[in-house]
Amino acid sequence: MRRAFLILATIALMLPPTVLLAQSPSPEVKKTAKADDATRPSSGGAGQTMKDSWITTKTKLALTTDGRTKARHISVETQGRAVMLRGKVSSTEERTAAEEIARGISGVASVNNALQIVPDDQRKTVDTKDDGIETAIRERLMNDAQLKGAGIKIRSDNSVVTLRGKISDPKAKSHASDVVRGVPGVRAVRNELAL
């Protein structure tokens, strides 16, 4: 009996506080809460960060347990209840399934599907090419006087490059896109740099 209590207590300590405090409200309260959520702007505080990380966790778990997707190839990020899917999938069906799964997660406001379709037999070649593109971009950014210390994060999925991070001014943001477009093999640039 004491051992079972210790196991339950250990599990309870490992759960996030929101899970421990969660209660199932009556149907009337649920309807009111959903209406309030739809009209209330999302706050950028710690509570929203916790909600976002919980949405990310639930989405990754759902992608893993659903047989239609290979979750290890899909990156999930959430910001302000908006889910971003990145990575490579083997078919249009898998891309669509990943988006459907993410949209079905409680609390998700929107889904941005940036998954690139790469057939399994081409994956190794495309991964190698993406690694080369990322290396070339890092070198160009390090040698650019305006972007040298910007700390820009780079990701290439089937030659579609995503830039993330914070940058000082709009001109530098635009310049980063121009630099990346000049790298051989880059098909498109998704500039998600924040000002």
Image (tube, rainbow, N blue to C red):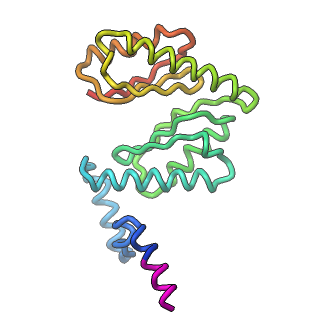
Give the residue furthest to the right: 121
Residue shown at 53% from the left, 25% from the top: 156
Assess whether residue 2 is covered by the magenta stretch: yes
The secondary structure that most of the magenta stretch takes on is helix
Q: Nearer the viewer, residue 41 or 173?
A: 173
Q: Nearer the viewer, residue 14 or 33?
A: 14
Left or right of 1 on screen, residue 142: left
Where residue 50 sits: x, y (%)?
34, 55
Query: Which image quadrant for residue 98?
Result: top right
Give the total number of marks visible in the rendering.
0
Q: For the magenta stretch, what is the residue range?
A: 1-9
The quadrant in which the C terminus is found is top left
Query: Which image quadrant for residue 133?
Result: top right
Q: Nearer the viewer, residue 14 or 191?
A: 14
Where residue 60 sits: x, y (%)?
53, 51
Residue shown at 69% from the left, 29% from the top: 123
Where residue 49 sits: x, y (%)?
32, 51
Name above or below for residue 164 compared with residue 72: above
Q: Nearer the viewer, residue 183 or 191?
A: 183
Assess whether residue 189 is covered by the magenta stretch: no
Where residue 138 sits: x, y (%)?
44, 18
Residue shown at 39% from the left, 23% from the top: 191
Residue shown at 51% from the left, 21% from the top: 134
